[in-house]
Image (cartoon, grey):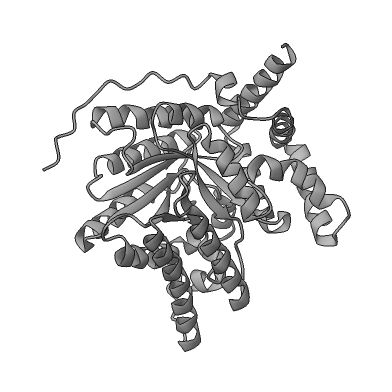
Amino acid sequence: MLPTPRPYSAPDIDFDDYESALREKTDGELRAANLVLTTIRKPWLMRAGRMFARAGLALRIPGTVGALERTVFRQFCGGTNLEEAIERTGRMFESGVASILDYAVEGEDDEGDFAAVTAEILRGVDAAIDRPDVAFVAVKLTGIARFDLLEKIDSGGELDDDERAELARAEERLDQIASHAARGGTSVFVDAEHSWVQDAIDGVVERAMEAHNRERAVVHTTVQLYLTSGLSHLEQLVARARAGGYRFGAKLVRGAYMELERERAADRGEESPIQPDKAATDDAYDRALTFCLENLETVDVCAATHNVASTQHLIDEMARLGIDPSDQRVTASQLLGMFDRITVPLARNGYNALKYVPYGGVRDAFPYLLRRADENRSVADQLASELFAVRTEIRRRKSL
């Protein structure tokens, strides 16, 4: 019988120690971060940059890929291939920070592309096996399944024989990835996507959990708490896992499609699925985090957040519940290029701290890069604090 957890005093972690958190960043990386974050904060500059980047990539204008690679790609991506990403994960692990590898390709639409993406994800799983610097491998279902098919399933449309066969092949691809991860002792995160395909994604992922999460949480899904249904949906998913006798793996995020979700709802004359304001989203996120921590007998949870208050909530709740910082059922994650001042101090205080490390060609990663820019622009206060941290460290180095 396991001993009863005992509450303890939460450690006092300084999330404003910029020098310590950004120590591993090169001067060039800091300059690139300053440029990218400054650009994101200026809407007119973002609009112009987005327009020129789209046109440059579409028309294959010389210099476009190189300019993106030196700036926004360098800020948010680990490299153009798996080998470059692995080099980046190894460097970060020197600070105790492990990684989530993500082949940043999505929105594919034919069987050849799906097979190629699956093969690359399997390469990532192979790389993660026996590497302490890689904790998880990410999967975007729209990289291995057709978006329109998922949308039809989500809307309740009846599939024909060809579509049912197509769905079966998509599920087989995810099963192949999960089986390989299970045999290798690693795990996968399935990313959240647009709300109008998310129920279909959840159905596929739940079936994979039921098959592979008997002994441990091999497969994890992502729950978006900026959706008004997020918390109740999480509770339902966990209840079904408990009833089904399998572990539920959850990555909790606020969300990355806010503007698209609101625009689509307005265009269709529907009520927005998004929380009314940031305070409501923050409250839902923290309640979801507490719910998962209170149900660790069934749940593995990753707190994926750039919010210092929510990170402190994680620390305080783990202390209240007597959960050891090193408990493998609990991780915390931030995106590469953002909030090292959260990730690094967590790692140094014994928490399982992760960085989400996308990689792939600049063209393939472009949708991911646009989401990062949009997401950061929508949380101006957090972006301002991140930019302040970067500029403070640049000034400190210049004064030496």
Residue at x 44%, y 70% (from the top left corner): 176
Relative to 308, is 105 on the left or the right? Answer: right
The single residue placed furthest to the bottom in the displayed view is 161
Is residue 340 shown above or below 50? above
Is residue 371 shown above or below 157? above
Relative to 310, is 335 on the left or the right? Answer: right
For the N terminus, the quadrant is top left
Tally of marks = 0
Whether residue 155 is visible, yes or no, is no
The single residue placed furthest to the front in the displayed view is 130
| Residue 147 position within the rendered picture, expressed as x and y whole percent measured from the top left | 55, 68
Q: Nearer the viewer, residue 352 or 47?
A: 352
Whether residue 48 is visible, yes or no, is yes
| Residue 295 position within the rendered picture, expressed as x and y whole percent measured from the top left | 24, 44
| Residue 259 position within the rendered picture, expressed as x and y whole percent measured from the top left | 59, 48
For the C terminus, the quadrant is top right
Q: Quadrant of residue 54?
A: bottom right
The single residue placed furthest to the top in the displayed view is 399
Residue at x 63%, y 46% (from the top left corner): 78
| Residue 198 position within the rendered picture, expressed as x and y whole percent measured from the top left | 45, 61
Q: Quadrant of residue 252?
A: top left
Is residue 40 shown above or below 259? above
Relative to 229, is 215 on the left or the right? Answer: left
Q: Nearer the viewer, residue 17 or 192?
A: 17
Residue at x 44%, y 78% (from the top left corner): 168
Q: Nearer the viewer, residue 281 or 77?
A: 77
The single residue placed furthest to the left in the displayed view is 1
Is residue 132 shown above or below 41? below
Q: Nearer the viewer, residue 276 or 104?
A: 104
